[in-house]
Image: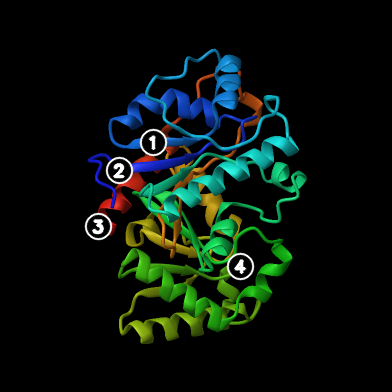
């Protein structure tokens, strides 16, 4: 049982060739006021990064010593940096699984670097899904709007075949059980939500899943399928806070256009709490001491703390 007044949160450090470590160092004082962060990085790599950035490591910067050492090459896709970011993430997961921390927050990885390191996963959510054997749900957003993704990092040509009534029904019910909202919008796949079959038949599967999930929950929770090109209009956003998109860019393009700097990534339907920044490694500005927007990271920490309180 964790007895600290401030919740303990493990921070996986992300790709050290990117902006993650700079965000962690610059925000340490602010987030230490609301939680007890434990950074999954060892002393040697921390010193290398701080020297490169010319930022002094705060005295209260508590670490969990993720093993490994390599030369930091700012803005570079690197096999070694990819492997280290993966190991840092696994250490954070293990700390949460052993109840040594109450949540984890992840800084950005580079998917190409993971691929170079022969890591079979394309992102954090896939790792969590495999680790816990649970159907983790990827939800992104902020207090104004949240978007959940039915399919994630797969080629667009494969999306239509993934839309199957049984699988989507389970997804909808699991999503409701995590967010407990009585008004959730579900997007169609095709333009105009197919115009009653003129432009495709995937909406039949979506409609059946909505009907079946609502019947199971004995409430009219899920609305749709909504026409995708108007689903995120101002009027629609007045009526809905939670949206379920059929594929990655369908949901994330409008979200990032509207709330890029403040959105966070949340993994639902898991035995642990995990939040993340909703941006990439920004290799183009890494280690250049430019003005970096840290709002997504601050919001991710705050959302983790909020979920900890809800869970209690």
Q: Which residue is mark 4?
A: 191
Give the residue drawn at x 71%, y 41%.
113
Helix, strand or loop under label 4: helix
Label located before the other in sequence (1 or 3): 1
Q: CA distance from mark 4 to mark 3?
A: 43 Å
Label located before the other in sequence (2 or 3): 2
Q: Which residue is mark 1?
A: 37
- Quick check: marks 1 and 3 in contact, CB under 8 Å? no
Give the residue drawn at x 53%, y 64%.
228
Front residue (pair 37, 76): 37
Label located before the other in sequence (2 or 4): 2
Label located before the other in sequence (4 or 3): 4
Q: Which residue is mark 3?
A: 312
- Quick check: marks 2 and 3 in contact, CB under 8 Å? no
Q: From what the image shows, is residue 92 above or below residue 126?
A: above
Q: Which residue is mark 2?
A: 7
Label located before the other in sequence (1 or 4): 1
Give the residue drawn at x 51%, y 69%.
135
Helix, strand or loop under label 3: loop
């Amino acid at each position: 049982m964790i007895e600290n007044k401030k919740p303990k949160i493990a921070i996986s450090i992300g790709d050290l060739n990117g902006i993650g470590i700079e965000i962690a160092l610059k925000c340490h004082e602010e987030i230490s006021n609301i939680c007890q962060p434990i950074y999954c990085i060892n002393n040697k790599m921390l010193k290398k990064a701080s020297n490169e950035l010319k930022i002094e490591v705060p005295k209260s910067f508590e670490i969990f010593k993720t093993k490994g050492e390599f030369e930091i090459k700012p803005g570079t896709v690197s096999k070694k940096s990819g492997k280290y970011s993966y190991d840092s993430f696994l250490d954070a997961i293990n700390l949460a699984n052993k109840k040594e921390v109450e949540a984890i927050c992840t800084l950005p990885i580079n998917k190409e670097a993971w691929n170079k390191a022969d890591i079979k996963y394309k992102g954090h959510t896939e790792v969590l899904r495999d680790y816990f054997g649970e159907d983790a749900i990827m939800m992104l957003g902020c207090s104004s709007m949240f978007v959940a993704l039915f399919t994630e990092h797969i080629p667009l040509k494969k999306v239509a075949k993934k839309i199957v009534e049984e699988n989507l029904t389970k997804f909808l019910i699991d999503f409701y059980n995590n967010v407990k909202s009585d008004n959730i919008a579900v997007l169609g796949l095709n333009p105009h939500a197919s115009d009653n079959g003129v432009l495709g038949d995937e909406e039949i599967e979506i409609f059946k899943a909505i009907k079946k999930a609502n019947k199971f929950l004995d409430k009219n929770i899920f609305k749709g399928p909504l026409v995708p090109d108007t689903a995120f209009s101002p009027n629609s956003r007045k009526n809905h806070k939670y949206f379920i998109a059929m594929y990655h860019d369908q949901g994330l393009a409008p979200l990032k256009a509207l709330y890029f700097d403040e959105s966070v990534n949340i993994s639902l339907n898991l035995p642990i709490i995990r939040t993340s920044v909703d941006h990439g490694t920004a290799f183009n500005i890494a280690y250049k001491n430019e003005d970096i927007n840290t709002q997504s990271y601050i919001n991710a920490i705050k959302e983790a703390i909020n979920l900890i309180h809800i869970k209690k």
